[in-house]
Amino acid sequence: MNVNLPELDSRLAELEMRLAFQDDVVATLNPQVAMQERRIVDLAEQLRELRREVTQLRAALGHDIGDEPPPPHY
């Protein structure tokens, strides 16, 4: 490979700029990703709680809605 020094310096400078940009993007995205992960965990817990409540309501009603006949218009 026959590369002259100014060209090599230019390519190295370009790579350093790209790396700096990527580091900045990663630093910006990390807190956002962490926040979204926390939100997903919170939503999953809320979903589990809703499922528990629905199960308890079904037990309290004493029947399963799936056992009911379809409405007359079916």
Image: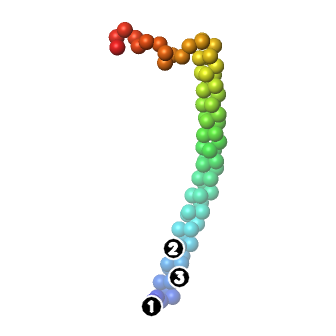
- Choose between 47 and 22: the one closer to the eye: 47
Q: Amino acid at mark 2?
A: Glu
Could you say where residue 4 lies in the image, as x and y percent from the top left?
A: 47, 89
- Neighbor class of circle 1 (other Cα within 10 Å; few <14, some 14-19, many 20+) is few
Residue at position x 55%, y 69% from top?
17
Residue position for label 1: 2
Cβ atoms at labels 3 and 2 below 8 Å apart: no
- Choose between 6 and 1: the one closer to the eye: 1
Q: CA distance from mark 3 to mark 2?
A: 9 Å
Could you say where residue 73 lies in the image, as x and y percent from the top left?
A: 34, 11
Dividing the picture into quarters, in which one does residue 58 lie?
top right
Viewer-nearest of discs 3 and 1: 1
Give the quarter of the figure containing the N terminus.
Answer: bottom left
**Depicted 3 relative to depicted 35: above or below:** below
Q: CA distance from mark 1 to mark 2?
A: 19 Å
Residue position for label 3: 9
Q: Amino acid at mark 3?
A: Asp
Could you say where residue 27 lies in the image, as x and y percent from the top left?
A: 62, 57
Dividing the picture into quarters, in which one does residue 54 lie?
top right
Q: CA distance from mark 3 to mark 1?
A: 14 Å
Residue position for label 2: 14
Number of numbered tags placed on the structure image: 3
